[in-house]
Image (cartoon, grey):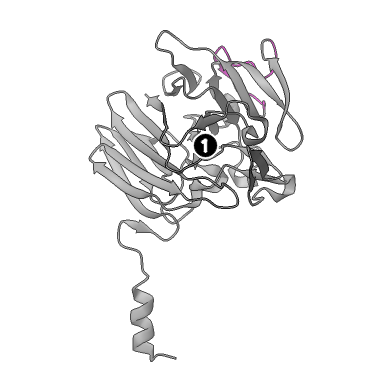
């Protein structure tokens, strides 16, 4: 055993740098005007986003980790993958079941991996993550995510590139929780662009049935209070304007404080979650409005799955505008 002085020196060498967290690595802070955001090295996670000091998203502390998926990037599949198993051509994937109570693999692989900083400016940070073949995802995929603050709020641009020799499947999602400006959550007003929902079974997996939401408890196509409604719902049939963007909004009753979230045409699905299954002290604190390129279980069903040939690249964007 080394002498105490040597042990102290060795232990001290593992202390995080001032801009680094024990739990999520480097903290990349950006700003524009009254907006502030922090993205972490682990997962390229949006840990914090605020306007004039008001939280826009429900984040977490510097020495915490992203419980409940807060602010995480979800790839190479978003949401749930039944039994963690799928087949693509002659290749079989076997992912670890990190939602064991439902026998699901959930939210992909990159949310717990360190990302490499590619670019950093006052109002911008971009990071990359390369997935090498593993039993859970036997393909070579490189992801790039850029967070940019500007006059139009926060813009998140993503690219996915097939850097391997074989055709690959993938899906992408993001997990921001929008922070209401009122308490309790029941008093907040919600508007979603979704006209349809996917029917989910007891494991949270799509049954294959799609239903319209008009006239049901899940119809938020017009701004209305959330009330007691519990959401853990996969929506589709997204209405878009002339700009081809789909918009969701969370606001206070008067509409004075609001956050609008938009998605381009790369994101055809929207998961909405009111946090009713989180730890008791964290339930119904915020609303997760999650842009997704595909629905849950897409690696098995093929629905909405993006297929990239070697050398091909996909790009999509979403963002938030707060006031």
Residue pictured at 52% horizontal, 50% vertical = 133
Q: Which residues are magenta?
A: 215-229
Disc 1 residue crowd, few under 14, some 14–19, many 20+, Cα 10 Å? some
As for residue 227 lying within the magenta part, the answer is: yes
Quadrant including the N terminus: bottom left
Q: Is residue 186 above or below residue 221?
A: below
Residue at image location 53% in from the left, 34% down from the top: 171
Residue at 76% across, 32% down: 201
**Residue designated by label 1:** 167
Horizontal arrangement in the rendering, residue 228 relative to residue 33 (left or right): right
On screen, residue 76 above or below 214:
below
The residue sitting at the top extreme is: 242
Residue 78 image-quadrant placement: top right
Q: How many marks?
A: 1
Q: Does residue 53 appear in the picture of this structure?
A: no
In the picture, which quadrant includes the C terminus? top left
Residue 20 lies, in percent from the top left, at: 35, 58
**Of helix, strand and loop, which one carries label 1?**
loop
Residue furthest to the right: 202
> Where is residue 266 drawn, in percent x and y?
47, 24
Using the image, determine if residue 168 lies above or below residue 187. Answer: below
Q: Position of residue 254 (x, y in %)?
A: 47, 17
């Amino acid at each position: 055993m080394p002498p105490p002085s040597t042990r102290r020196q060795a232990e001290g060498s593992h202390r995080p740098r001032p801009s680094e967290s024990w739990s999520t690595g480097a903290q990349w802070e950006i700003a524009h005007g009254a907006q502030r955001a922090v993205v972490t090295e682990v997962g390229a996670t949006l840990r914090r986003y605020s306007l004039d000091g008001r939280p826009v998203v429900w984040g977490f502390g510097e020495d915490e980790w992203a419980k409940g998926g807060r602010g995480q990037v979800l790839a190479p599949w978003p949401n749930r993958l039944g039994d963690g198993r799928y087949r693509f051509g002659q290749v079989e994937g076997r992912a670890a079941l990190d939602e064991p109570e439902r026998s699901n693999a959930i939210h992909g692989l990159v949310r717990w991996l360190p990302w490499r900083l590619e670019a950093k400016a006052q109002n911008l940070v971009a990071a990359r993550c390369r997935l090498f073949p593993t039993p859970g995802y036997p393909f070579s995929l490189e992801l790039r995510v850029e967070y940019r603050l500007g006059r139009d709020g926060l813009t998140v641009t993503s690219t996915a590139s097939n850097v391997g020799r074989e055709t690959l499947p993938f899906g992408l999602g993001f997990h921001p929780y929008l922070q209401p400006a009122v308490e309790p959550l029941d008093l907040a007003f919600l508007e979603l662009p979704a006209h349809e929902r996917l029917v989910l079974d007891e494991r949270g997996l799509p049954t294959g049935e799609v239903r319209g939401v008009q006239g049901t408890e899940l119809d938020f196509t017009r701004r209305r209070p959330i009330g007691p409604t519990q959401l853990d719902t996969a929506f589709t049939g997204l209405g878009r304007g002339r700009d081809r963007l789909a918009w969701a909004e969370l606001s206070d009753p008067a509409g004075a404080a609001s956050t609008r979230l938009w998605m381009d045409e790369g994101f055809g699905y929207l998961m909405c979650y009111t946090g009713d299954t989180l730890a008791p002290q964290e339930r119904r604190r915020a609303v997760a409005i999650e842009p997704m390129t595909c629905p849950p279980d897409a690696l098995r069903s093929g629905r909405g799955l993006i297929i990239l040939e070697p050398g091909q690249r996909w790009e999509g964007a979403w963002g938030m505008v707060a006031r």
